[in-house]
Image (tube, rainbow, N blue to C red):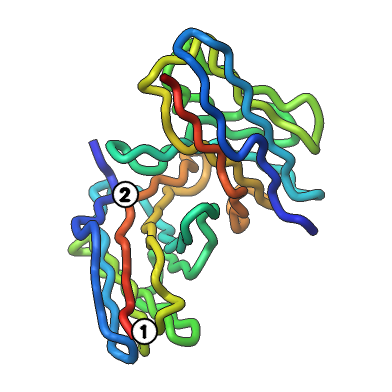
Amino acid sequence: DAGVIQSPRHEVTEMGQEVTLRCKPISGHDYLFWYRQTMMRGLELLIYFNNNVPIDDSGMPEDRFSAKMPNASFSTLKIQPSEPRDSAVYFCASSLGLMGEQYFGPGTRLTVT
Amino acid sequence: DQQVKQNSPSLSVQEGRISILNCDYTNSMFDYFLWYKKYPAEGPTFLISISSIKDKNEDGRFTVFLNKSAKHLSLHIVPSQPGDSAVYFCAAHAGGSNYKLTFGKGTLLTVNP
């Protein structure tokens, strides 16, 4: 298996623009997680899905952030409008079972100018 | 409020010596603890874990110790190798319906040849 795939790997955008990050989990995994890593706050869980259904989105910072999982092999994290403080590395991870080992993608480095 | 704290941002050791990475937590509901390793431009990868019913878990060169009364855990790497140079994240969760993997900010380990 190719592992968790994220795209793009790098994204540079201007403040106010819409940003969409993409994730393909490992085939057969039933949980998908979105994390954000910043210097100030470290690695934080934003939201997670089970069988394509959002279970806990309490980590989503504000309404500008939204996440969807239309099918078992694809998820998006959208920021609209983006702000400079959203600059971070965003990771997607998937697991088999809630307590299963989480496999992380390589991350998307987002820079909002 | 950081529930999982890694107070040493960096650690440097000589090849062949022991590396000890420390982690403290404040949430007494945490009952499962994990260590992840992260190389630059890659996502974190699972390294070793320990349940709160144990005080030690060993896997090859890696051993995790848990002191519940002190709310402290440590990762020992013996002997350290240059390939161990990476950022190490401590993580914890409470399990059950309160599941949420909470990470520390990480410790950069450098193993010098």
Q: Amino acid at mark 2?
A: Lys
Q: Quadrant of residue B45?
A: bottom right
- Crowding at dot 2, Cα within 10 Å, few <14 / some 14-19 / many 20+, comes out as many
Q: Chain of mark 2?
A: B
Which residue occupies 40% across, 84% down?
A: B81
**Relative height, residue A102 to residue B2 (above, below):** below
Which residue is more in the foreground, B63 or B40?
B40
Q: Where the C terminus of chain B falls, by quadrant?
A: bottom left
**Relative height, residue B107 to residue B53 (above, below):** above
Q: Which residue is mark 1?
A: B80
Which residue is more in the foreground, A72 or B52?
A72
Q: Where the N terminus of chain B falls, by quadrant?
A: top left
Q: Residue A108 at x, y = what percent?
A: 56, 38
Which residue is more in the foreground, B111 or B97?
B111
Q: Is residue A70 left or right of residue A42?
A: right
Q: Residue B28 at x, y = what percent?
A: 28, 50
Specify the label residue B57 is tagged with. Answer: none
Q: Which residue is mark 2?
A: B105
Which residue occupies 54% across, 30% down?
A: A47
Q: Chain of mark 1?
A: B
Q: Is residue A55 left or right of residue B35?
A: right
